[in-house]
Image (cartoon, grey):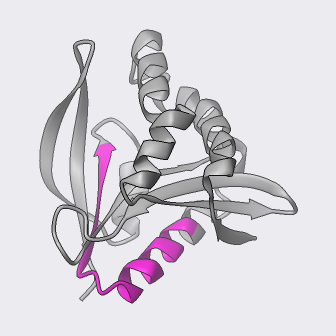
Amino acid sequence: MHVKPALPNEFNVIQSIAARTWPETYGEILSEDQLGYMLDMMYSVEALNRNYDDGVLFVLAGEDGDYLGFAGFEHDYRTKGRTHIHKIYVLPEAQGKKVGRMLMNHIENSAVGNGSESITLNVNRSNSARFFYEKSGFSIVESVDIGIGNGYLMEDYVMRKPLR
């Protein structure tokens, strides 16, 4: 298994993984309308290109030519010394195969190499992935509600992992 940088010509792979992962992850948390709205807002090729142009680094995790997960993260997010994970998803059939751990290790190594003092991420308050993040050394630092348009809210925990 390996992790490699994802280039804009591979954003369709990220889009496909998100489309396959989100219904499983959020199907009981979000309405079908909100799920579709958010997938389009965050995972259209245009949205991914805007993220990339704004400094988000994308990586793909794969094995034997198949991509099993991806992550998008940004160094010096809102302040120097902070790496923020914007997106990290693993296909449902690949969960439990340590793909998420590989992606997290890659991000952490990149953050340390960039001189970051911490890594942060947002996770939906009802998403069980929160427990994976806690096992990875993250703790909840605040609870936020973020309006994303169409009357929808992201109801998240902000989690932080110190690196020093």
Left or right? Give the position of 15 relative to 47. right
Q: Is residue 116 magenta?
A: yes
Left or right? Give the position of 115 relative to 18. left
User: Where the C terminus falls, by quadrant?
Assistant: bottom left
The number of numbered discs placed on residues in the rendered structure image is: 0
User: Which residues lie in the magenta part?
Assistant: 103-123
What percent of the width, then of the height, locates residue 99?
A: 63, 62
Is 66 rendered above or below residue 108? above
- Seen at 75% across and 70% down, the residue is 1
Using the image as rendered, state which of residue 110 and residue 31 is in the foreground. 110
State which quadrant residue 152 falls in.
top left
Using the image as rendered, state which of residue 17 and residue 124 is in the foreground. 17
- Seen at 18% across and 33% down, the residue is 146
Is 156 rendered above or below residue 147? below
- Seen at 64% across and 59% down, the residue is 60
Q: Does residue 95 appear in the picture of this structure?
A: no
What percent of the width, then of the height, locates residue 4?
A: 66, 69
Left or right? Give the position of 47 relative to 134. right
Q: Does residue 10 appear in the picture of this structure?
A: yes
Using the image as rendered, state which of residue 54 and residue 41 is in the foreground. 54
State which quadrant residue 38 falls in.
top left
